[in-house]
């Protein structure tokens, strides 16, 4: 029960965060409980505005000019995860060991100057993009490579965070009638609609969002008329992302 209470408390911190910094801190704390690691950090950056802030649990928030943050920025061209994100600009989960061979990685100055002194061999990073083009990066590293089994918590947590309102932009054409309908939904209704489209049953949605089955059904009763549909299947066809 104590472990379950801790997990619920961490999820509650994420959901009730009042700003992006709190969101990042709470998300990183939750990820640490899922992925044993000897290094973790979070970063918020905006490519268009060229802003960058890095968070370390032992150091707090570090501005771009701080040595720890500066070394990451200067070495970004050698960081395969960062290069991939800057190229695709898509929310995703990436692992160093799946992108660069160990033999090549240990020869980079980025590894030898930053990760080797910290005892880090492999990195797993979750990238999430907000509608305002801010990017949240959550990073965990450890002294051995992540196995396929180790990567599953990253992907599961990525899907959960991606369903939060701040990461659920309305579809790209704001003049469409469907966008106007989506705009009428509350953040919770949009979350439920997202998981409905992912094929989740009501009981599964209740578990994911930490609410009762009755509450899920109550929200669906409100969603259907707002979206002009009458069935679960029709609602599942609505494009949320």
Image (cartoon, rainbow, N blue to C red):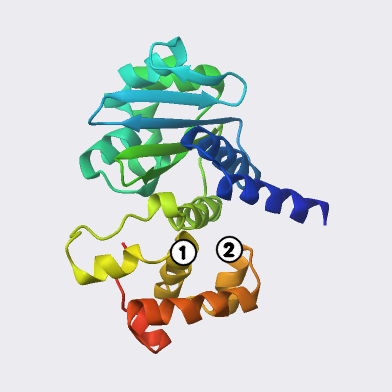
Query: Residue at position x 21%, y 57% from top?
Result: 172
Q: Are marks 1 and 2 in contact (CB under 8 Å)?
A: yes
Image vertical order of residue 199 relative to residue 64, above or below: below
Q: Is residue 235 above or below residue 97?
A: below
Q: Is residue 121 visible?
A: yes
Observer able to see residue 123: no
Quarter of the N terminus within the rendering: bottom right
Q: Nearer the viewer, residue 236 or 146?
A: 236
Q: Secondary structure at mark 2?
A: helix
Kindly identify which residue carries mark 2: 209
* Nearer to us in this view, 228 or 85: 228
Residue 9 position within the rendered picture, expressed as x and y whole percent measured from the top left = 70, 48
Residue 134 occupies quadrant: top left
Position of residue 95 in the picture relative to residue 57 (left or right): left
Which residue position holds label 1?
191
Q: Residue at x 52, y 16 (%)?
A: 117
Picture coordinates of residue 200, whole percent (x, y): 49, 75
């Amino acid at each position: 029960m104590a472990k379950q209470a801790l997990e619920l408390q961490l999820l509650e911190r994420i959901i009730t965060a009042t700003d992006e910094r709190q969101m990042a801190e709470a998300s990183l704390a939750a990820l640490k409980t899922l992925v044993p690691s000897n290094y973790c950090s979070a970063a918020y950056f905006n490519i268009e505005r060229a802003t960058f802030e890095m968070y370390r649990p032992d150091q707090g928030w570090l501005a771009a000019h701080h040595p720890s943050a500066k070394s990451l920025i200067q070495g970004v061209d050698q960081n395969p995860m960062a290069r991939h994100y800057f190229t695709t600009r898509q929310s995703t989960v990436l692992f160093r060991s799946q992108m660069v061979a160990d033999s090549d990685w240990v020869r980079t100055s980025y590894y030898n100057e930053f990760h080797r002194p910290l005892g880090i061999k492999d990195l797993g990073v979750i990238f999430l993009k907000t509608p305002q083009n801010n990017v949240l990066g959550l990073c965990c590293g450890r002294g051995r490579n992540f196995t396929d089994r180790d990567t599953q918590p990253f992907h599961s947590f990525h899907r959960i965070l991606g369903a939060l309102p701040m990461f659920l932009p309305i579809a790209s054409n704001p003049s469409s009638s469907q966008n106007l309908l989506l705009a009428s939904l509350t953040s919770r209704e949009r979350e439920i609609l997202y998981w409905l489209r992912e094929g989740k049953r009501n009981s599964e949605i209740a578990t994911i969002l930490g609410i009762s089955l009755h509450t899920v059904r109550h929200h669906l009763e409100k969603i259907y008329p707002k979206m002009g549909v009458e069935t679960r299947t029709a609602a599942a066809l609505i494009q949320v992302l």
